[in-house]
Amino acid sequence: MAKIGIFVGTIYGNALAVAEEAQQILGQQGHEVEIYEDATLEQWQMYQQQIVLVVTSTTGQGDLPDNIQPLYTEISDNLGYQPGLRYGLIALGDSSYDTFCGGGRAFDKLLQEQGAKRIGDVLLIDAIDVVEPEVFAQNWIEEWGSLL
Ligand SMILES: Cc1cc2nc3c(=O)[nH]c(=O)nc-3n(C[C@H](O)[C@H](O)[C@H](O)COP(=O)(O)O)c2cc1C
């Protein structure tokens, strides 16, 4: 079973609710799961040869929330290449914005550029259609966990 770090970017708590749902489902599957808000680069690097799940909303105009933006910048500035990392990505947003899920998409692009291997497709959750994102995400999380 896998060791998984869930890295959360949230303003109002929706992404955190999805992360907590993921922790429960993945834990039931037998994985060892920890959630990080306001994560440091050291915490990210503990998973360099393991698995991370990034769960982030978008704010501003396609921006990452303040609690995950510093981590993104540190990864971008300091890491360069992460070929041993496997990851999944859940992006929350609102399709009335041109920059739909821009924060999550930017994080995915960075990890792709750094050679990390994504497991599964990115899950996009649109606040216009979805009232309970943590319920909406359940099937995706179960499938993702079974791919690890
Ligand atoms: C001020 C503000 C700016 C936002 N900007 C965007 C955006 O640029 N793109 C997008 O897809 N969603 C945007 N959203 C929508 C949020 O990402 C969405 O409501 C999400 O579910 C919030 O999750 P959270 O509670 O984890 O922060 C914005 C929301 C607010 C309140």
Image (cartoon, rainbow, N blue to C red):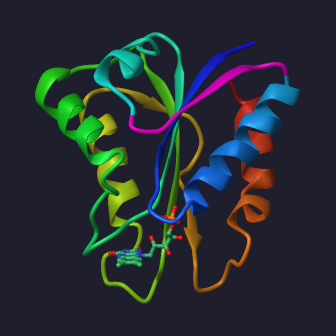
For residue 82, above or below residue 19: above
Observer-nearest of 11 and 103? 11
Residue 86, percent from left and from top: 49, 24
| Figure disc tally | 0
Q: Is 28 in the magenta?
A: no
**Quadrant assignment, res 28:** top right
Q: Is residue 107 left or right of residue 13?
A: left
Q: Residue lying furthest right in this view?
A: 28
Q: In this view, does 53 lie to the left or right of 109?
A: right
Residue 3, percent from left and from top: 63, 15
Observer-nearest of 118 and 106? 106
Observer-nearest of 79 and 74? 74
Name which residue lies at 73% across and 51% down. Answer: 140
Residue 146, percent from left and from top: 78, 31
Q: What stretch is highlighted in magenta?
A: 30-38
For residue 17, above or below residue 30: below
Residue 78, percent from left and from top: 14, 22
Name which residue lies at 63% across and 45% down. Answer: 19
Give the quadrant of the C terminus. Answer: top right
